[in-house]
Image (cartoon, grey):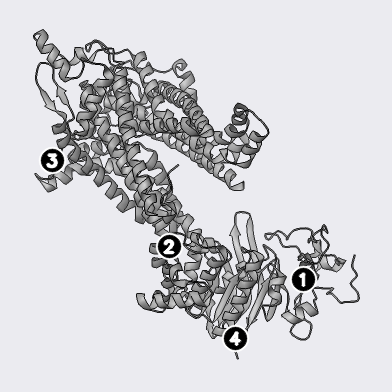
Amino acid sequence: MFKRFQQADWFTRVSVIWLFIVGLCAVFGRALPLWNPLESDFESLGVGLGSPNHFLGTDSNGYDLLSNVVVGAQTSALISLVSVGVGGLIGATFGVVAAYRRGRFDYVVNTVFNIFLSVPNLVLGLTLVAVLATSSDPSVPVSVNRRTFVIIVSLTVVIIPILGRIARGATLVWVNRDFVVAARSMGMRDKDIIMKHIVPNVLPAIYAVGFLAFGVVIVAEGALSLLGVGVIDGVSWGSMIARVAGDYEFAPHSLYVPAVVLAITVISCNQVGEYLRSRLDLREGKI
Amino acid sequence: MFTFRLQSFVRRAAQLVVVLVGSTFLLAMLLLLLPVGMEELFVVAVDEAGRLEQLKRLRLDRNPVFGYLGWLWDFVRGDFGPIIYPGAGEDAVSDRVARALPISLLIVLYVQVVALLVAVPLGIATAYRAGSKGEKVVSYSLFAASAIPNFVFALLLAAFFGVTLGWLPPLGYVPLSEDVVGHLRTMVLPVLALAIPTVATYTRLLRTDVIAALREDYVTMAVSKGLSNKRILLTHVLRPSSVTLFTSAALNMGGLIGGTLVIEQIFSIPGMGSEIALAIFGRQYFALQSYVALIAVGYVLFNVLVDVLVGVVDPRARGRRNV
Amino acid sequence: MTSLLSIRDLTVRFETPRGLLVAVRDVNLEIPHGTSMGIVGESGSGKTVMSRAAMGLLSGSNVRREGAIFFGEKELTAMSREEVRNEFGTGMAMIFQDPMTALNPVRRIGSQLAESLRVRLGLDKKAARLRSIELLSSVKIPDPESQLEKFPFQLSGGMRQRVMIAIAISCNPKLLFADEPTTALDVTVQSQILQLLSELRRDLDMSMVLVTHDLGVVAGNTDYVAVMYAGEIVEQATTVDLFANMKMPYTEALLNSIPKINSQSGARLRVIEGRLPDPTQRPSGCGFAARCSYVQAKCTAEHPPLVDAGNGHLYRCWFPLGNTIARKQ
């Protein structure tokens, strides 16, 4: 894998490095000697980049932007990793099995996918979050952890049909190839055929789209925060943007910082996904 | 060949019904998970008779499945149910939809038109000049632009042009019937915010397809026939290249609708997005059911339209099902 | 009398990430009016690049073309792209190897046929349609009128090739390039197409350049033959003379590699061992040296020039066949 990294063009390499940095922040963020992201530094409200105590400045509440970015990476990364990971696993499993077995099972699975896909991602996510995060007493806000959990579950549900459809499509390409028919004719068990023959060929396509899905989820988290159902009292990139929404004039850079970080991360995800996809096409071409 | 079309049409219609029923049914069942009962939310009555009457109207007095079926029956006849302000009266959802839907549709229409108008020439230009330095710059910028979320653009545009420069109103909406200029002024920023990433995506798509088409043998053959570049472009290259673009444009409708949700909030535009947000925050789950149903219907209809168009443009695809 | 097509010192190079690729090197060819010339070579010999370069169809920012190409009196290499394009269809035309990819898959046959007629000859819709039907008959397509409405994928391979021929001759070109016209077809159809091409040539007084890898194809169908190897012409003569007095070991090897119908069943196919030299790094000696059965020391050291055997039969070899010095190894 490392060799493939060295082979890639510079843009892809930078993207991978960036994602790696984000990953590091996600894991070690809270351990770093940074300001508490939710602690107001009343002496430096809304200061700009490169200020003495605050490397990236602060927002109008006095929150240090750098620490918010670093710790926020944890939330964003957690949400996307789990949603895409779990959602991808569930979706791909159903997709592959459905395409392999065909018949009624396939029809049902495909229809279910289509049903979920007929509602735009954000609307679906928003609806799920709103319903599941409703508290019984309207005056008591839902806890941050429960919010995060609900967001993860909702986005997982959104991802399942997306990756499921990709997996199904990819499997359909392979399931009729001669070597699968040959394996079946030699009495190989379905389970083994799927694991040994189909999955290795389908996995690259899923990886490629999976990276794109990371980007989608990170953006979705941002959108949900902006709409007010994100992790508002917690620390995340989306909530950083949400907090700025009304205060732009006072501290414009407090919008730019999370926006730029978000954009670069999404671009990196897209670039890695695109790179994997183009390598996949090359492979297919050789066959 | 004609029966093929009929067959696929029937198949599509059946699919529409299945999707519509499926998505709304799932939503209805989902609502059962609410920690708060629907009854508690909506039923406020002075006495038992009034309460029973309200329960009956909202179909909460029976098995949820039958309640759902009742709602479905009303829905297909155009009655989208009520928005209830417990103890303070109600609105008909259909009225609100009638007011909000055209606004959102207008925004989406503007975005698609603008995006296509820009993306088509840009896609062709970048394809023909592929490899040149200028083209590389443009392509990388487009790639970056397609990855930046639309609400980021929206916030930046609103902040910069709306507040800092003050050229355009950062908030609000003026209907077309009232004041054309005012209408357009309030539309510029939201449409731009949605259109920029869309243009980027469309251009990249078209560019890939045009480059692929230019490599095809039949283009070399067309050149060998002595046809002009312009003619080759219009009659040989654009047709196959535009298929993916159309399909994506249609499939993008879903993303655009989701986009309008956020954009309408940012710019305070009273469209469907705002309605949906209001319904969600106001816990108007009945209305939400109708909204989701409408969106599902719209989406599937669009897919049908796209399939038909693709059949027109590429005859190899006629009668064939999208796998 | 000037030749119809005159190629002088044509060299074509491609700039690739791996280096400068020389596809065609110092090629000189004359094609007189009303004759047909075969260009024979294996894949990668440069024959296709040369034919496309000759017609001016090579496009791409990485192509470097040198030399002069004359079509009658006009110097194509000195003309602008539009002027050269003007010669297409009415002066020169090309038919391609795979009719499935060379015909636009989403347009009907009739409209593709009529396109040249209407744009280049200025015919109106009705006249174009009539002429299209005539053209389809001339390429022996049955029931031409109903074929006009069909799409390429609805026709068989042989029919598609005929349609492509019809399109190519629609404006009565004086020179037809046929780039591997029969390679994508099976054997029975091959001979039909070749015969059709010969007849059309006679009827329309058209010259033809037939590019192929199969010596058998040129045998009965061409007046002259030029054999290409690694971007150069290595043997050139009238077809009769080439087969009668073959000079190049390479040509002999090509001839031997054609499977014969009367050979013993189970006999091994005779192949030419080895591969073409890397086009980014030309060897110093003869390009075929590594694979030649008659190779001598001089072959790998010095690059042989093209010499005339006396009667216009050109060859590029230090030890041509029939030479008493050469001895089969």
Q: CA distance from mark 2 to mark 4?
A: 35 Å
Q: Amino acid at mark 3?
A: Val
Tag 2, which secondary structure?
loop
**Any mark on residue C107, and which?**
2
How far apart are the two marked residues, 1 and 3, measured between alpha carbons? Answer: 81 Å
Please give the name of the residue rendered at 68% of the width and 72% of the height, measured from the top-left corner: C217
C259 lies above or below B159? below
Q: Are marks 3 and 4 in contact (CB under 8 Å)?
A: no
Chain of the residue that carries numbered disc 3 in the rendered image? B
First in sequence: mark 4 vs mark 1: 4
- What secondary structure is found at the residue carrying circle 3? loop
Relative horizontal placement of residue A194, taking residue B280 as reference (left or right): right
* Residue C14 versus residue B105 in the image, above or below: below
Label 1 secondary element = helix
Percent coordinates x, y for residue A48 in the rendering: 32, 29
- Of residue B50 and residue B39, the one placed in the foreground of this image is B50
Q: CA distance from mark 3 to mark 4?
A: 75 Å
The residue identified by callout 3 is B174
Q: Quadrant of residue C72?
A: bottom right
Residues packed near mark 2 inside 10 Å, few (<14), some (14 to 19) or many (20 plus): some
Q: Quadrant of the N terminus of chain B?
A: bottom left
Q: Position of residue B116 (x, y in %)?
A: 32, 51
The front one of B284 and C134 is C134
Asked whether the residues under marks 4 and 1 belong to the same chain, the reply is yes
> Residue C251 — which label?
1
